[in-house]
Image (cartoon, rainbow, N blue to C red):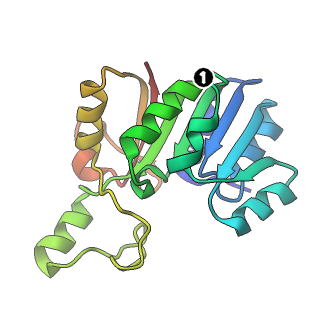
Amino acid sequence: MSLRPDLAIIARNVAPGSRVLDVGCGDGALMAALRDQKQVDARGLELDPANVAAAVGRGLSVVQGDADTDLADYPDQSFDYAILSQTLQTTMRPHVVLDHLLRIGQRAFVSFPNFAHWRVRLSLLWGGRMPVTRLLPLAWYETPNIHHVTIDDFRAFVREQGLTVEGAWFLSDGNPARPAAANFFAEHAVFLLRR
């Protein structure tokens, strides 16, 4: 089974034998790949009960929980990596969730859709409506996205918080995009952060 492009980047950059917490782990695809290919001790937190059942069915250690409320229960520095993939924009208080990620893990991977991508801008400019695209397939009233973050917004936030970016990857149509123009051309971003 192949991983979603942002998850593949994360999988390639997690050190073998690490302890990992995957927040918003979905059906556990990344955790299973890390366990099977890198002998990672992976744990997961997932809101959707059907995804929790699918992950547990793969033999993974996943609990049902909410990133906005349940991360406070995890002890400091209990993982080498905390991962938040395609979930940041769905949290009520992303800044608090990120703070917990970097408290719980020595490093944090964060991936998110870029709402400043040219297709999103074009849709707003020409249609005057919130875009519905291949990567953002739901209408504004159905989407779980409540914070529309851009790459430049995230970079500014990281600077303001004094965080260190150890790695940054940008994707368009699942392929690498240029970092210099990522805010315009990249559909997704993946950052590796530490305090």
Residue found at x 37% / y 39% = 95
Please say whether residue 90 is visible from this viewpoint: yes
Q: Which image quadrant is residue 144 in? A: bottom left
**Looking at the image, residue 39 lies above or below residue 69:** above
- Pointer 1 local density, CA inside 10 Å: few below 14, some 14–19, many at least 20: some
Q: Quadrant of residue 135?
A: bottom left
Residue pointed to by mark 1: 76
In front of the other: 135 or 171: 135
Q: Percent from the top left, x then y, of residue 9?
A: 55, 39
Q: Amino acid at mark 1?
A: Asp
Say which residue appears at 24% left-offset and 42% top-offset. 153
Q: Nearer the viewer, residue 135 or 21?
A: 21
Query: Which image quarter is the C terminus in?
Result: top left
Vertical arrangement, residue 90 with respect to residue 134, above or below: above
From the viewer's perspective, is 168 left or right of 67? left
Name the residue at 70% across, 59% down. Answer: 27
Work out which quarter of the rendered image holds the N terminus and state it: bottom right
Residue positioned 61% across, 29% down in the render: 81
Report x, y in % for residue 173.
42, 58
**SS at badge 1:** loop
In the image, is residue 122 above or below residue 88? below
* Residue 188 location (% of width, % of height): 40, 51
- Please state if 95 lies on the left or on the right of 72 as rendered: left
Asked which quadrant contains residue 14, the reply is: top right
